[in-house]
């Protein structure tokens, strides 16, 4: 109530003063969101702007993530960078190595004199965007993780329990075999193959994807996803592809359409696909945690974050950092995060938002949206925190090329992963030398 009275008083005072004396501090936020998500972001900015009278957030669509990052770095050098920049998680290392271009979120809060407690955020989500010392580097925004979807109607037809998803990878094979016998052409498919089957797979089984804590320990990491466990998993999927149990749809999210159209019975992909699947599917479907290999010690651990975070650009006035800090505090409110999570399907950033959503009964009608959150509530280990490597977009492209050769039988799983590691490490060396 006191804050509301104070806000009204400030507005009344401005009405009596000259317009120039009450000019709001404008904060420019570059993003790469289109469609409904772009509308949601604009709605957040508008709600913040109406909640107080001192600051104004102006969201600006700046093209693709690569285009926005390139423009922001160039703008920083020319003194024309935005205040806030949206960056995908694979761009984290690149942002950290853009000398002097960013101000860590923890530092922004300190400059603004705002109390800030990173412990309020979902553990496996926030830790990805933190320094080894526990300082938050960027602010998590639209975040997701990998989950397992299955067609309950197809399961029932095949004699499988429609309310019981496969828990392990051998159980997925058993389900696939029964689905094929029941007449299903596509038993299992997957989106985002590198992210699901190597990156999340590594964290879920608590094994290294790369040395040096997957890049968190510094700039000299080397890829390690050609271990016996990784080779076993990719070889298993390649064998399934030959037997008709696994259908490769493409390296990105192409498989999601094959699932919600009713063509494929099982899917591993992003939790962010939930809303689209729910909108387009004409059948009952379930959402479950990623399968794992039960004999691997430490599995399951936690999955890792996908999506984007908000970075604060340097070279701005103190009052602008105060505005950014206020905006981030606004975005962290439980009621704001709970609504964002429920409307978009992205993860809630804070445990308080998760608890608020749970208390509201939301998960009783949308149980699938809780699965992703529960996978991320576990405190991560150095091996499961995430992946922070330079040139990672290009490394993923190499992984996609090599995995496609494994699925088609043109290479063995070991040859494909060995080659991907070798080629990827060459890019890491280039990054160390300052060559992008």
Image (cartoon, helix red, strand yellow):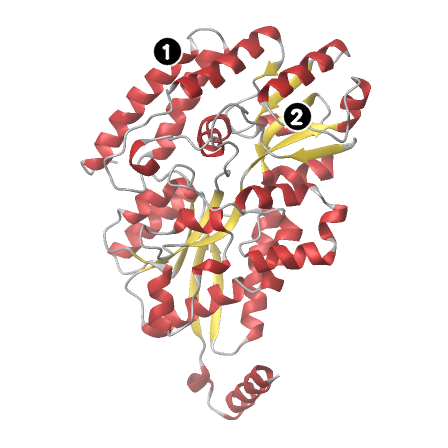
Question: Which residue is pictured at 52% across the width and 67% down the height?
Answer: 330
Figure check: 354 above or below 334: above
Tell me which corner region of the image, top left, top right, bottom left or bottom right, holds residue 256.
Answer: top right
Q: Is residue 136 left or right of residue 222?
A: right
Marks 2 and 1 sit apart, C-alpha to C-alpha, by 29 Å
Residue 95: x and y in percent read 32, 48
Q: Nearer the viewer, residue 139 or 18?
A: 139
Question: Which residue is pictured at 43% across the width and 66% down the height?
Answer: 116
Q: Earlier in the sequence, mark 2 or mark 1?
A: 2
Dot label at residue 415: 1
Looking at the rendered image, the quarter that the N terminus falls into is bottom right
Dot label at residue 166: 2
Question: Which residue is pictured at 52% across the width and 49% down the height?
Answer: 142
Whether residue 43 is visible to the viewer of this picture, yes or no, is no
Among all residues in the image, which is located at the extreme left? 433
Residue 396: x and y in percent read 40, 28
Q: Secondary structure at mark 2?
A: loop
Mark 2, other Cα within 10 Å: few <14 / some 14–19 / many ≥20 = many
Question: Which residue is pictured at 73% across the width and 35% down the height?
Answer: 280
Q: Nearer the viewer, residue 154 or 160?
A: 160
Q: Is residue 73 left or right of residue 308?
A: left
Q: Secondary structure at mark 1?
A: helix
Q: Are marks 2 and 1 in contact (CB under 8 Å)?
A: no
Mark 1, other Cα within 10 Å: few <14 / some 14–19 / many ≥20 = some
Figure check: 40 above or below 155: below
Residue 190: x and y in percent read 57, 25
Q: Is residue 5 left or right of residue 235?
A: right
Looking at the rendered image, the quarter that the C terminus falls into is top left
Tell me which corner region of the image, top left, top right, bottom left or bottom right, holds residue 419.
Answer: top left
Figure check: 271 above or below 156: below
């Amino acid at each position: 109530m006191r804050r509301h009275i104070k806000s009204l008083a400030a507005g009344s005072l401005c009405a009596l003063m000259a317009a120039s004396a009450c000019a709001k501090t404008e904060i420019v936020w570059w993003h790469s969101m289109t469609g409904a998500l772009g509308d949601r972001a604009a709605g957040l900015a508008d709600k913040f702007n109406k909640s107080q009278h001192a600051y104004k957030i102006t969201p600006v669509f700046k093209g693709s993530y690569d285009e926005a990052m390139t423009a922001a770095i160039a703008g920083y050098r020319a003194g024309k960078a935005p205040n806030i920049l949206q960056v995908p998680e694979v761009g984290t290392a690149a942002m950290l190595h853009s000398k002097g271009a960013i101000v860590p979120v923890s530092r922004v809060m300190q400059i603004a004199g705002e109390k800030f407690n990173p412990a309020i955020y979902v553990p496996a989500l926030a830790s990805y965007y933190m320094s080894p010392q526990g300082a938050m580097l960027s602010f998590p925004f639209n975040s997701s993780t990998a989950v397992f979807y299955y067609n309950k109607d197809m399961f029932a037809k095949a004699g499988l329990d429609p309310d019981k998803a496969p828990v392990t990878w051998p159980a997925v094979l058993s389900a696939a075999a029964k689905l094929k016998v029941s007449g299903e052409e596509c038993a299992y498919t997957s989106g985002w193959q590198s992210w699901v089957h190597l990156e999340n797979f590594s964290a879920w089984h608590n094994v290294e994807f790369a040395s040096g804590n997957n890049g968190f320990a510094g700039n000299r990491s080397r890829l390690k996803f050609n271990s016996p466990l990784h080779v076993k998993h990719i070889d298993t999927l390649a064998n399934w592809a030959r037997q008709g149990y696994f259908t490769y749809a493409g390296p990105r999210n192409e498989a999601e359409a094959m699932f919600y159209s009713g063509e494929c019975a099982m899917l591993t992909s992003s939790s962010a696909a939930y809303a689209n699947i729910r909108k387009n599917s004409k059948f009952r479907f379930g959402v479950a945690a990623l399968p794992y290999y039960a004999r691997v010690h430490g599995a399951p651990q936690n999955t890792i974050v996908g999506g984007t975070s908000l970075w604060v650009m340097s070279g701005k006035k103190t009052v602008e950092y105060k505005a950014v800090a206020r905006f981030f505090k606004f975005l962290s409110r439980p009621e704001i995060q709970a609504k964002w999570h429920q409307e978009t399907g992205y993860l809630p950033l804070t445990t308080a938002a998760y608890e608020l959503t749970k208390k509201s009964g939301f998960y009783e009608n949308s149980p699938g949206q809780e699965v992703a959150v529960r996978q991320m509530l576990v405190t991560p280990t150095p091996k499961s925190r995430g992946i922070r490597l330079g040139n990672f977009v290009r490394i993923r492209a190499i992984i996609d090329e090599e995995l496609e050769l494994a699925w088609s039988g043109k290479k063995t799983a070991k040859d494909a992963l060995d080659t991907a590691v070798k080629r990827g490490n060459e890019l890491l060396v280039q990054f160390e030398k300052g060559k992008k």
